[in-house]
Amino acid sequence: MELVFLDTKTIGDIPNLNLLEKFGRVTYYETTQPDQTLGRIRDADVVVSNKVVLDKAIIEQSPKLKLICIAATGTNNVDKEAAEKRGIPVKNAMDYSTQSVTQGTFAILLHLLVNVPYFDHYVKDGEYAKTDIFTHFGPGFWELAGKRFGIVGLGNIGRQVAKIAYAFGCEVVYYSTSGQNTQQPYLRLELDEFLRTCDIVSIHAPLNENTANFINYDRLVQMKKSAILLNVGRGGIVNEADLARALDEGLIAAAGIDVFTKEPILPDNPLLHVKHKERLALTPHVTWASIEARTLLMEKVGQNIEAFLKTESSLANA
């Protein structure tokens, strides 16, 4: 069997990348440009892709293709209707990054809240050695305990974030963008109260018709001036120009953003040009990507191929 992995660079150097080789001959490509895709998969039985687009024309012109494996959760890079017409399953990977994203969420939050780099530089630059007292207060920082921690998106990740926030002593509340998520052990608020009263707003929702441009200027105005906004969900949920404006106007205290409308980020993205850079932490869509999470992702891709082959074998022997 011929397998092709089109964009191994998107999952990096992990210890089990070669597990695909137990299924057949594998060709690896670090990246694949649109004009290269068809030539690389034309003779493949199984294609693994994270972000490479597999559109209708490519699927129709790949006669041997039997299975498409997405090395991610989202499948929007595949024309699923075209695949279904050809009887080609499209399999994604689920629930591989919950612990990683949760850890990353709090890493960003604590960076904004405590500002460890400031204190680190204060000591390493020799300023602490010059002081006449044992400590240094600097810009000051607040505790998480007792704060209202608001979550948008109580899926696997959101629920894990809620557990950690609760362990820090936060009051956990949530807002449901669909209006249907009511069976949760936390207080559900309507949007106005949610924005007005939360000290931290942490977004863990998918991008859809309910969440596109969800946090815009009008909603940022409603938030506490001391609030911190986090988006580790999807780019496009937070209006980036409006957030940059809000930070420069001091409408909220700080923001941490891991996902962007266009990735990689464009040089003219307003978030790169905020006046008060200390109010903003930016990471390159990386909170999902612990070594453990990427290793588990590869395991799940392998499990999808294995399950497909078992089904094929059962049908052949029926």
Image (cartoon, rainbow, N blue to C red):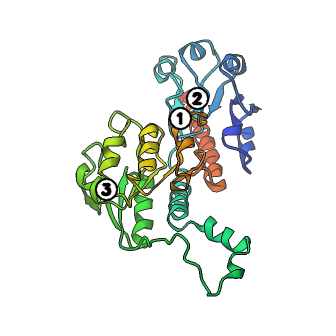
Q: Is residue 313 visible?
A: no
Neighbor class of circle 1 (other Cα within 10 Å; few <14, some 14-19, many 20+) is many
The residue tagged 3 is 174
Residue type marked 3: Tyr
Residue at 41% across, 40% down:
242
Residue at 50% across, 55% down:
279
**Cα–Cα span, label 2 and label 3:** 36 Å
Looking at marks 2 and 3 on the same chain, the residue that comes earlier in the sequence is marked by 2
Seen from the viewer's position, the closer of residues 285 and 313 is: 285
**Cα–Cα span, label 1 and label 3:** 31 Å
Helix, strand or loop for disc 3: strand
Quadrant that contains the N terminus: top right
Q: Which mark is residue 91?
A: 1
Residue at 48% across, 24% down:
80
Neighbor class of circle 2 (other Cα within 10 Å; few <14, some 14-19, many 20+) is many
Q: Residue 231 at what x, y percent from top left?
A: 46, 49
Residue at 54% across, 24% down:
88
Left or right side of 237 for 70: right
Q: Which mark is residue 68?
A: 2
Q: Residue 129 at what x, y percent from top left?
A: 72, 81
Seen from the viewer's position, the closer of residues 156 and 318 is: 156
